Image (cartoon, grey):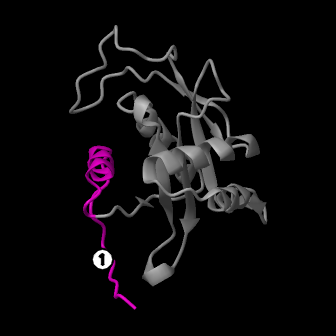
């Protein structure tokens, strides 16, 4: 995947633009690129910081799944970095194309998205979501899905603000 660079200060619908003098940590643009092996430790540390659950083996497995299987990627694992510091991970997104589960047509699934708390409200999450949506479109998908816990207000607000809404399926569960 090519680098995609975006100006994170652009005005987003429903939100005030970042003030011109807002601290940015020195980055003026965000680069989105395919995750590399060297990024996995930073992704794992970011996830542990946000969730409180360290799981480095999980992130390495997801990294391995982005490699081609039969000529097509089995997963999409992207990271966002300051354009001037491509080794510094600000956030990540992981997804894959899934088909026919529960009668669903093929679609892109986002199953992990996280942004460093100090980098939020700068367009990092939006840039990551746009980049994976473009990867899904290029693969022929016309639908993107994710799941969010009902009480996860920040992720729910983010995804709703990006145009995702309730889909045709309801998740059910039972304690065992």
Q: Residue at x 43, y 60 (%)?
A: 143
Residue at coordinates 30% horizontally, 29% vertically from top-left?
A: 12
Nearest the viewer among 141 and 8 is 8
Side (left or right) of 123 relative to 93: left
Q: Is residue 54 magenta?
A: no
Identify the residue shown where x is 29% and y is 56%: 152
Residue carrying label 1: 170
Assign the C terminus to one quadrant of the image: bottom left
- Quadrant in which the N terminus is drawn: top right
> Could you tell me what secondary structure mostly forms the magenta stretch?
loop
Task: Identify whether 38 is placed above or below 7.
Answer: below
- Count of picture labels: 1
The x, y position of residue 72, in whole percent, is 72, 60
Residue 161 picture location, percent across and down: 27, 44
Which residue lies at the image location 64% right of the left edge and 37% below the top edge?
33
Image position, residue 60 (x, y; %) = 69, 57
Q: Is residue 5 above or below residue 37?
A: above
Residue found at the very far bottom of the displayed protein: 176
* Viewer-nearest residue: 128 or 133: 128
- The foreground one among 59 and 160 is 59
| Image vertical order of residue 13 relative to residue 28, above or below | below
The residue positioned farthest toward the top in the image shown: 21
Image quarter for residue 87?
A: top right
How many neighbours does mark 1 have within 10 angstroms: few (below 14), some (14-19), or many (20 or more)?
Answer: few
Which stretch appears magenta?
A: 150-176
- Badge 1 element: loop
Image-quadrant location for residue 61: bottom right
173 in the magenta segment: yes
Q: Is residue 104 above or below residue 150?
A: below
In the displayed structure, does residue 157 sit left or right of residue 139?
left
> Could you tell me residue 83's position as x and y percent?
60, 22
């Amino acid at each position: 995947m090519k680098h995609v660079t975006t100006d994170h200060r652009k005005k987003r619908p429903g939100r005030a633009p970042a003030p011109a003098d807002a601290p940015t940590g020195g980055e003026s643009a965000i680069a989105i690129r395919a995750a590399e092996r060297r990024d996995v430790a930073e992704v794992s540390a970011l996830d542990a910081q946000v969730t409180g659950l360290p799981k480095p083996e999980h992130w390495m497995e997801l990294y391995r799944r982005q490699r081609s299987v039969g000529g097509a990627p089995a997963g999409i694992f992207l990271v966002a970095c300051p354009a001037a510091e491509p080794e510094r991970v600000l956030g990540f997104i992981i997804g894959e194309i899934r088909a026919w589960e529960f009668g669903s047509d093929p679609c892109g699934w986002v199953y992990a998205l996280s942004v460093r708390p100090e980098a939020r409200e700068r367009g990092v999450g939006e840039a990551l979501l746009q980049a994976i949506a473009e990867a899904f479109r290029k693969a022929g998908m016309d639908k993107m899905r994710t799941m969010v816990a009902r009480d996860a207000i920040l992720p729910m607000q983010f995804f709703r603000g990006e145009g995702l809404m309730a889909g045709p399926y309801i998740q059910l569960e039972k304690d065992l």
